[in-house]
Amino acid sequence: MSEGPRVRVIGSLSEVEAAAWDLCAHAPALDLAAPDMPARDAATSTMVSPASDSGADLVAAYDPANPFVSHAFLQALETSRCVGGRSGWAPAYVIVETPEGRLLGAAPSYLKTHSQGEYVFDHGWADAYERAGGHYYPKLQVSVPFTPATGPRLLVAPTEHAATVRVLLVAGLEALRRQTGASSIHATFATEHDLEALVPAGYLERHDIQFHWLNAGYGSYDDFLATLVSRKRKTLKRERREALAAGIEIAVLTGSELTESVWDAFFGFYQDTGARKWGRPYLTRAFFSEIGRTMADQTVLVMARRAGRYIAGAINFRGRNTLYGRNWGCIEEHPFLHFEVCYHQAIDYAIANGLARVEAGAQGEHKLARGYRPVVTRSAHYLADPGLKAAVADYLARERAAIARAQRELREEAPFRTTEPEVNLPDTK
């Protein structure tokens, strides 16, 4: 470049071209480290040999076509008023561009006045800091709102300047934090490549566990069942039969099948369940219409119908090799219907479409009995106050060790016959 790139903050994705943003969001993972860079140990966050038995193979994967960091998804959150306004999520995207205005990199970042809708919980940090006389809010959140799915947080176009752009994005986030008086920066559900840039910049690494289903090349659901112990196979077969016993039928809808009447039905389920779980659902009705318009082919809606009307549904989004389960809702309660619509149908879809994995959202140890495996998710947190940072660093070191123990114990409880089936993870570079 004849002149250096510039860093600035924009308040809306309407200020950048969708194709330019998506070139950054969906670029192949860039191997900026040495070729023999070892994996991170889940317990200590130190580096270990790739051949060591650390469980590092069961960490959340990077899908190069992650739908949530796409321009269409993030823009839908804006235009439908899920973010902005009084939501407590103020878009403040950090971008890097050439002097001519060509986008080189971006970070989906938001100024937050609360800690809701994040799924990586820091309420205890906020309370402690406030009691000590500090001001935890505003804070800067680098994530996809309301979406606990691992994906890139430092989005970089595939150019020879990629390493420099990543450094500039990290510096831009810190400059924005200082300018706004934010106490901290939180890059949640981040990738390994993100952490390689953020941890050396003073961010603290945090781990948690989700449950993902991994495809070992199954030709059918029965092939998958054959890997489970006998009693678990019988349990899941009975569970699937009983879920549909009341005359319930399942429809898997995508593309042009996602009509406004279908969205009306699903939004009713989402509102009812969301209101009971956390008081006010995060997503508006307009959001679903918008993604139906711009992301229909990446949206997979599993709907249950009884007596001529829809009674339950789950929305999924599809990447290149991953199906992401997101929101569920129902207006009738039926035994095991939640498991059928959210988990078994997702497995069916992944097998039929040759997908490598299903990510079924946050939490839920009940997924383990249905063949989902415990995987480690990671976040990075920059805390400006030295005292708060020291206290949180001590806590996170102990928490990482506890997460590693929990993952080992959960793997031992898995329903597979002997060892977990070997999975060939897709090449994402």
Image: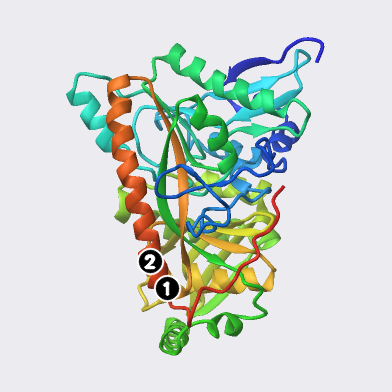
CB under 8 Å between callouts 2 and 1? yes
Residue 16 image point, x, y percent: 69, 26
Q: Nearer the viewer, residue 59 or 41?
A: 41
Residue 259 image point, x, y percent: 62, 59
Q: Vertically, is 42 above or below 254? A: above
Left or right: residue 101 compared with residue 173: right
- Residue sitting at x 54%, y 82%: 227
- Residue sitting at x 30%, y 24%: 136
Quarter assignment of residue 332: bottom left
Q: Amino acid at mark 2?
A: Leu
Q: Residues within 10 Å of mark 2 (few under 14, many from 20)?
A: some
Residue farthest left in this picture: 131
- Which label belongs to residue 410? 2
Q: Vertically, is 362 above or below 356? A: above
Left or right: residue 272 compared with residue 106: left
Q: The residue tagged with tag 2: helix, strand or loop? A: helix
Q: The residue tagged with tag 1: helix, strand or loop? A: loop
Residue 13 in view: no
Query: In which quadrant of the rendered image does the N terminus lie?
Result: top right
- Which label belongs to residue 56? none
Q: Vertically, is 49 above or below 4? A: below
Q: Amino acid at mark 1?
A: Ala
Residue farthest top in this picture: 3
Q: Which residue is mark 1?
A: 414
Residue 174 image point, x, y percent: 49, 19
